[in-house]
Image (cartoon, grey):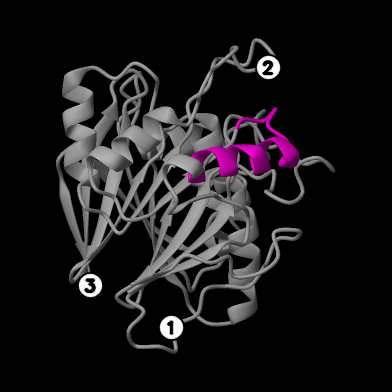
Amino acid sequence: MSNFELSGSQSYVSEEPIMPPCNPTEKILVKFWGVRGLIPTPCSRTHRYGGNTACIEIYVGGQHLIFDGGTGLRILGRTWQKLHEPLEAHLFFTNSQSNHIQGFPFFAPAFVTKNSFHIYGTAASNGASIKQCLCDQMLQPLFPYPIQAMQSKLQFYNLIPGQEIKIGDATVNTALVNQNQKSLGYRITNEEYSIAYVTDLHKNLDQAERDRILQIIQNADLLIANATYNPPTSDKHEVNDVHWKTAVDLATSASVKQLVISQHHPDDNDDFLDKVQLEIQSVFPKALLACEGLVLSIG
């Protein structure tokens, strides 16, 4: 069974680190630190769901796994500084676009010598490795300090779609989910429980893309996915644009138990997202829209 209730009020961001579960039946804990797509959107109309870009933390098998390093990664890093003990974590990037990596230069624990981070990603559309992409955004004039200023131990791993990674008792499987953006989807498995993280869905999936996605999300206890939207050329969605339909269709086809929609469009304010959540739940009852501070347990 899974706890699919909000861990606290959606009116603020809970800035507490994930701690090992007290209940041994809880196999996996998930926390959302950034839930916005494209660009950070901090304002009074987005404070309930949050304005930081993509970052989630998963605690599984005694290991801390982070997926994407948007500006939510800065908030996560700030909470980890309170722990006052050496940190080791695994950071997975879905792609190298700015909203997925822009929090990395502000990830304070990476500047602390005693810490260690394993960093995973696939080659960008221009062929650059994840290490190169992270290094480039920390060069002048974009950022005052190069990546060499990070005194923690950084180990980089170049992934290819279909690769499997073992981390303690957890297994992470990968699949290509968006050819144009060279985006990876991930499936995290511990014993019989699994979470799928697939957040670069687009509206017009071809059959090959659909098959790859269905394979990695099939029967997942939790699917974290994005709603699709148009390029930011307008402040409105298309008329009759059901932008969550792709995620819901995939979740239904794959017999996913629970669905969380994340990476909300910058123009989607809290009131709009409230309505969207009700719309989604009318066709997929076990669904939520992600908000910063949301914690879910699987087990």
Numbered disc in front, either 3 or 1: 1
Task: State the residue in front, 257 or 177.
Answer: 257
- Main SS of residues in magenta: helix
Name which of mark 3 and mark 1 comes first in the sequence: 1
* Callout 3 secondary element: loop
Mark 3 vs mark 1, CA separation in Å: 17 Å
Q: Is residue 234 magenta?
A: no
Q: Which amino acid does label 2 sit on?
A: Lys
Residue 72 appears left or right of 220: right
Q: Which amino acid does label 1 sit on?
A: Pro
Is residue 201 visible to the viewer in this orientation of the structure?
yes
Kindly identify which residue carries mark 1.
Answer: 21
The circle on residue 168 is: 3
Name which of mark 3 and mark 2 comes first in the sequence: 3
Numbered disc in front, either 3 or 2: 2
- Does 136 appear above or below 84? above
| Residue 175 sits in quarter | top left
- Does 234 appear above or below 30? above
Q: What residue type is labelled 3?
A: Gly
Task: Check if mark 3's residue and mark 1's residue have beta carbons within 8 Å.
Answer: no
Name which of mark 1 and mark 2 comes first in the sequence: 1
Mark 3 crowd level (few <14, some 14–19, many ≥20, 10 Å Cα)? few
Query: Residue 207, percent across and down?
Result: 18, 20
The circle on residue 236 is: 2
Please report the residue visible at 39 percent of the width from the left and 19 percent of the height from the top.
203
What segment carries the magenta color?
265-281
Residue 125 appears left or right of 170: right
Task: Check if mark 1's residue and mark 2's residue have beta carbons within 8 Å.
Answer: no
The circle on residue 118 is: none
